Amino acid sequence: KDRYVSFLQMSCEWHHLMMLKRAGHGHEDSGVKGMQLGELAVLCPACPHPEINLPRGWESSPPSDS
């Protein structure tokens, strides 16, 4: 029998479980249903995020500093 389709499905499930584990949700009692939308999203390190990689007072800095 050809098991390729089953293997692909199992591979997708494994990747999803690894995402849950790496995000710290691997052993929660509520499981996937207890998560909020977008909780597994990875923050882009190149995109500006206030309080993470933007300096304080960036909103009031002059346009010449951008």
Image: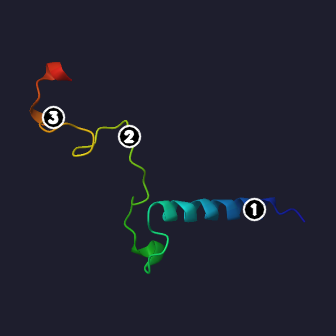
Assess whether mark 1 and mark 3 are in contact (beta carbons under 8 angstroms): no
Residue at 34% from the left image edge and 38% from the top image edge:
47
Cα distance between the residues tagged 3 and 2 = 18 Å
Q: Is residue 28 left or right of residue 47?
A: right
- Amino acid type of disc 1? Phe
The disc label shown at residue 45, or none:
2
Residue annotated with mark 3: 58
Q: Is residue 63 left or right of residue 32?
A: left
Compare marks 3 and 1 and give the one earlier in the sequence: 1
Judged from the image, the secondary structure of the residue bearing numbered disc 1 is helix
Around disc 1, counting alpha carbons within 10 Å, would you say few (fewer than 14), some (14 to 19), or many (20 or more)? few
Q: Quadrant of the N terminus?
A: bottom right
* Closer-to-camera residue (57/32): 57
Residue annotated with mark 1: 7
Judged from the image, the secondary structure of the residue bearing numbered disc 3 is helix
Residue at 75% from the left image edge and 62% from the top image edge:
7
